[in-house]
Amino acid sequence: MIERTHLKILREINRQGSLTAAADKLFLTQSALSHTIKKLEDLSGCALWEKKGRNIHLTQAGAFLLKEAERILPQLERIDSKLKEFANNEIGTLHIGMECHPCYQWLTKVSASYLEQFQGIDLDVKQRFQFGGMAALFNHDIDLLVTPDPIQMKAIHFEPVFPYELVLVVSQHNPLSKKGLVYPQDLSEEVLITYPVEPSRLDIYQQFLTPGNCRPRKHKTLETTEIILQMVAANRGVTALPLWLADEYTETLPIKSIRLGEKGIHKQIHLGMRSSDRNNKPVQAFVDLAKESTLHA
């Protein structure tokens, strides 16, 4: 029964002091304004004002409704403003899921540019081990999934954004550092250090060791890239990382990158999104910045 128009009319009458001035402010005719209030009075069964000459006096019901108008309208206007900001991509949160431990360093470069360009958009990043990436996309828990291993499924679109080569990283004191490339059997006496991911999901196993029917002497897992590379630099083991990431540490640590096999292992970072979000401006802007990062890598 009560509409926003009724509240706005009472507020403007109180502010302007007359029906004519209130009608002008609301871009209504005086008769349309009076008709609107009369219809509300008929529906509610109570009068909202009384006319005495040119003056208007609110009844108790009218005074109550004016008080509510002064309370409710600012809240509705704030909601309108926020919805407009969302519509213009000026506010909100972009939720990103990670299925790639070393990709986190890559993500920080893209996110820094994104946050600078989109002042009203926050970023939220979830690590892979806390959820299932594809399920999170379907359930709208995340908006983008960062992964080197896209799974083609209906209603999900994957965009390749950053190519890289997976390499073996060894200490400069390791005999393997003298080689230009390594074969699976070269790792049979090595301690392999990886992130805490099942071997069946690690490229070093899937695309290198398992096809070569080889296994490392020992397999250790660590969570952080820095500690893994410090262990490698101390010749406590070897690891497999993207070449671009290994290169970032070669100036500060005594390590070397070696190609895995004659052709190497070449991968792509992909950004997965719901197909319905391909025209979503905050999502597409992040994809565009991610692609630009390739040009500066």
Image: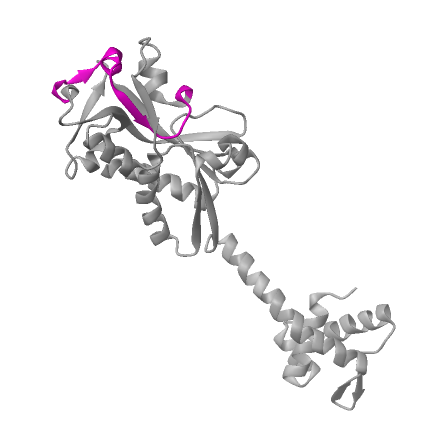
Relative to 117, is 59 on the left or the right? right
Residue at point 67% right, 86% down?
17
Relative to 295, is 210 on the left or the right? right
Is residue 185 highlighted in magenta?
yes
Residue 251 visible at all:
yes
Q: Nearer the viewer, residue 132 or 142?
A: 132
Residue 188's x, y, as percent? Answer: 26, 14
Residue at point 44% right, 30% down?
158
Q: Quadrant of residue 209?
A: top left
Residue 74's x, y, as percent? Answer: 61, 70
Residue 14's x, y, as percent? Answer: 67, 82
Residue 30 visible at all:
no
Q: Nearer the viewer, residue 236 or 111?
A: 236
Q: Is residue 178 above or below residue 75?
A: above
Q: Is residue 188 above or below residue 140?
A: above
Residue at point 54% right, 29% down?
155
Q: Can you name the residue that lies furthest to the top here?
A: 213
Relative to 53, is 93 on the left or the right? left
Relative to 271, is 162 on the left or the right? left
Q: Can you name the residue that lies furthest to the right here?
A: 45
Residue 127's x, y, as percent? Answer: 43, 38
Placement of the N terminus among the 4 image quadrants: bottom right
Residue at point 49% right, 32% down?
133
Q: Quadrant of residue 233?
A: top left
Q: Is residue 41 above or below residue 94?
A: below
Q: Quadrant of residue 103?
A: top left
Extent of the magenta region: 177-200
Is residue 187 highlighted in magenta?
yes
